[in-house]
Image (spheres, rainbow, N blue to C red):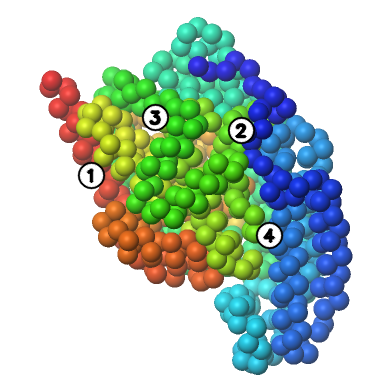
Amino acid sequence: MVATELRTRADVPAEDTWDLSAIYKSREDWEAAIAQVRKDVPKLAALQGTLAEGPARLLEALRLEEIIGDRLTRVYSYAGLRKDEDNANTDAVTDYDRVVTLSVEASQITAFVEPEILALPEGTVERYLTEESELAIYRHALENLLRQREHVLSAEQEQLLAAASEMAMAPSQIFSMLNNADLTYGTITDEDGNEVELTKGNYLRFMESRDREVRRQAFEGMHQAYIDHRNTLATTYASSVKAEIFYARVHNYESALQASLQPNNIPISVYDNLVDVVNRRLPLMHRYIDLRKRALGLDQLQVYDLYVPIVPEIQADSTFDQGVETVLRSLAPLGDAYRQVLSAGLDSRWVDVYENKGKTSGAYSWGVHGVHPFILMNWQGRLDDVFTLGHEVGHAMHSHYSSTTQPYTYSRYTLFVAEVASTVNELLMTEAMRRETDDRAVQMYLINHALEDFRSTLYRQTLFAEFERWTHEHVEGGGALTPDVLNEKYAELTARYYGPSVEVSDFAAAEWSRVPHFYRAFYVFQYATGLSAAAALSRGIMTEGETAVRRYIEFLSGGSSKYSLDLLKGAGVDMTTPQPVEQALDVFEALLGELEGLMATGAQE
């Protein structure tokens, strides 16, 4: 049953919301923490110009920087989570803006640390590490900094850039407010003839409708809202791209892509390998699309036909509690300790469950060092929501292990491995659910769901990655990102990726304008590489058992204490080669063949 009207935040029962008192017992405590940050920042600033005095000064600076970062992260998290509860809550938005400003001010004042370390005579940092044993904890961070020497500017220049960073965040913030607070999508007529409000929260439910007219209304209604703001959105996205290119150039990077990958020691070849391998194996996607077309009995598919399950008989609706039970049961291969921590967390209001007016759309996990992770959901009861919960608790447990194992400096995992744990969970869930049933229709449904994961994660996110690479290269080459240029490129990619069986309408061509991840440059490719790594890790967990689980938990516990590629190699996956992507697509091909066989058998019965 689709709700015809969203609840206000005040009408949501407390037990269905996350408990932010785990961060601060009261808003007064939050204000006190802000005041403490304001006291600590000048203490660090007072150390400017003293790091050459010896290892004790460097240790003092790094420790103070860590304390400020930890406290500032908590202050920021509290405000950000409150804002995401209801983006129309002006007090919460104001508090969030205050923290953004504080973060910028703090980063501006303390921006001297890295340049001053790099200005030390060659060999000084290495000598400090030898003379002061307590600096050992910072060894990896210092060595990583020295590796980036040519891309860090003088203290004065870095302080100036830090001061400008709030302006650079404007495109993302403008898009977020438009996307989450201002845009409305009208109403559509559902399968029962009821007029209902279209929201981002119920959009996917309508896209999975067996009624093609409902799918068309939802797709066109959603995208029309963005088309109506096409010039604003194109200008906003173009401004975001220009800001990224500006920061890349002033830091002496050859491109915005290099600037995004190099700090985590990721070669551009990893990005290019992904795009090349996926493009080489696009015929597999076209084969899947053709199967979908035959299953739906359509002569030509529209993009809005790509989400409806091929097997209509399955009723997969579930309550949130049932979803939690499914997730916990499916993750049994990860061991009792993993599941006990997760179960206790889900019972302790880690999750904000249901959609309400003004709430940020989609789903995410937000780790807070020294506290616990928080999960935002917009639960609609679909099978996809169960998998989304499994996905987000993967993130949450990654944050839990990193936070409880590593000091603040290394407690946050890098973007490159950010999607690995979440995707491992989804793959384990699919296998578990398939083992629990011999019902042919259920098997087909689950296989189709897995294929959809590959379509939406490996293929679609690579499409996004190729689009991002092109938009940045286009601007770097002097081009302009107008609505027509963006629509034309996005339509070309959509047609190439999905093949001749899918018609790309003007609505589909505008899809780029509603993708929030494009305001976090070159993030999305890591969904695809993450799935590739996760496919290898989950296969090892299911075949090797405890040994593979131990390696995997060590990976989750690593945070950023090593380079991401090295953490993955330690877990048994080498992402510097095309092999993991090829192997993941082999899994896709095997699943596709299995579904083709089951459907052919059904047609003969």
Q: Which residue is mark 4?
A: 246
User: Which mark's residue is nearer the viewer, 4 or 3?
Assistant: 3
Distance from Cα at disc 4 to Cα at disc 3 = 38 Å
- Please, what is the three-letter code of the amino acid marked with disc 3? Leu
Between 30 and 179, which is closer to the camera in this rendering?
30
Q: Is residue 332 left or right of residue 380?
A: left
Q: Secondary structure at mark 1?
A: helix
Pointer 1 or 3: first along the chain = 3
10 Å crowding of disc 2: few (<14), some (14-19), many (20+): some
Task: Give the CA distance from mark 1 to mark 3.
Answer: 20 Å
Report the side of 123 relative to 290 (left or right): right
Q: Residue shown at 42%/31% (left/top)?
A: 383
Which amino acid is tagged 2? Asp
Residue behind mark 1: 590
Quarter location, residue 85:
top right
Q: CA distance from mark 2 to mark 1?
A: 40 Å
Q: Are marks 1 and 4 in contact (CB under 8 Å)?
A: no
Left or right: 582, with 392 as reference point: left
- Whether residue 393 can be seen here: no
Give the residue at x 81% y 35%: 90
Marks 2/1 in contact by CB < 8 Å: the verdict is no
Residue sitting farthest toward the top: 193
Q: Amino acid at mark 4?
A: Phe
